[in-house]
Amino acid sequence: MSIERISALLAKAERTDNAAEADAYLMKAQALATAASVDLAFARAHTAKIEMCQAPEIRTVTIGEKGKRANQHLISLFIAVAHANDAHVDIASNSTYVMSYGMPGDLDAIEALFASLAVQMTHSAQNWLALGVWRAETYVAWKKSGGSWSRSTRPHTAQTARVSFYRSYIARVEERLQAARDQARDQVLAERDKGRAGQKAGELVLRGKTTEISDFHRANTSARGAWGGYSGAVRTDKGSAGAAGRHAASNAHLAAQRALPTKPVLEG
């Protein structure tokens, strides 16, 4: 895995003010990560020595301080990146860190992509909020009472506009990463094994990798229950906040660090 090349592409995405150019760098980084991951899966399937060196592992990534509102959204972003790169994720019950399960090279790419995208997302959201467009807009708020949901229309605050921006941004990133992953995987399989039989053999190798990581996760996780995700009132947004989030390409500040915090309950 050429993590240096991936990091260089992500750095270019962060520096440019051109949205299309930033997006192109991001997609190229994801495609490179996918191609390297597929190549390694083939190598592991055919070379015992490499297989011994490249086994699934667990890493802990710090998300943010306890009680920070942004943590839920950063976790959603991390999950989107992890799932595009063949990893499982457990989430701390206090949303301060995550644990990722996958191949070392994939986990390197996930951490690089997440750190870059977190920087881009928060920075572009802050820049957009400063424009003040959201001040004249409303959003649909959902509230659960007993067993039923009610909805109401409320004026945006800076907080709710930021949430709308983040949620739309993350949904768009997830779509684009999955598309880049699928395209790169199909291309690598087609180039590596010509013909239908070779394609099926390649798919079996990748399925084997997926099964191995799933088995590794089940054997090592201590998670109880399932992470509920974002729990606030902002569920949909068709205004400028959502549109800005979907089209954002250069964004802002959070360093994903590896650290092993104390022991809140994990949620799978």
Image (cartoon, helix red, strand yellow):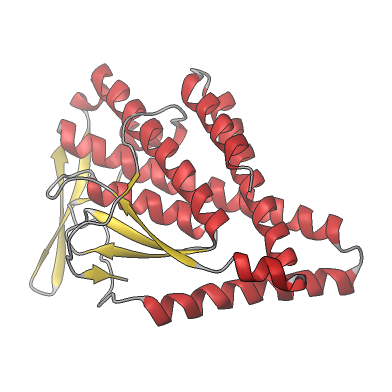
Say which residue appears at 25% left-offset and 35% top-offset: 162
Residue 74 x/y as whole percent: 31, 47
Q: Is residue 118 shown left or right of residue 226?
A: right
Say which residue appears at 25% left-offset and 65% top-offset: 228
Q: Is residue 235 visible?
A: no
Say which residue appears at 52% left-offset and 72% top-offset: 213
Residue 48 in the image: above or below residue 108:
below
User: To which quarter of the image does residue 161 belong?
Assistant: top left
User: To which quarter of the image does residue 92 belong?
Assistant: bottom left
Residue 151 x/y as whole percent: 17, 55
- The residue closer to the viewer here, 94 or 77, is 94
Say which residue appears at 51% left-offset and 19% top-offset: 16
Residue 170 x/y as whole percent: 40, 45
- The residue closer to the viewer here, 62 or 182, is 62
User: To which quarter of the image does residue 206 belong?
Assistant: bottom right
Residue 222 x/y as whole percent: 29, 77
Residue 26 in the image: above or below residue 181:
above
Quadrant assignment for the C terminus: bottom left
Residue 248 in the image: above or below residue 150:
above
- The residue closer to the viewer here, 154 or 190, is 190
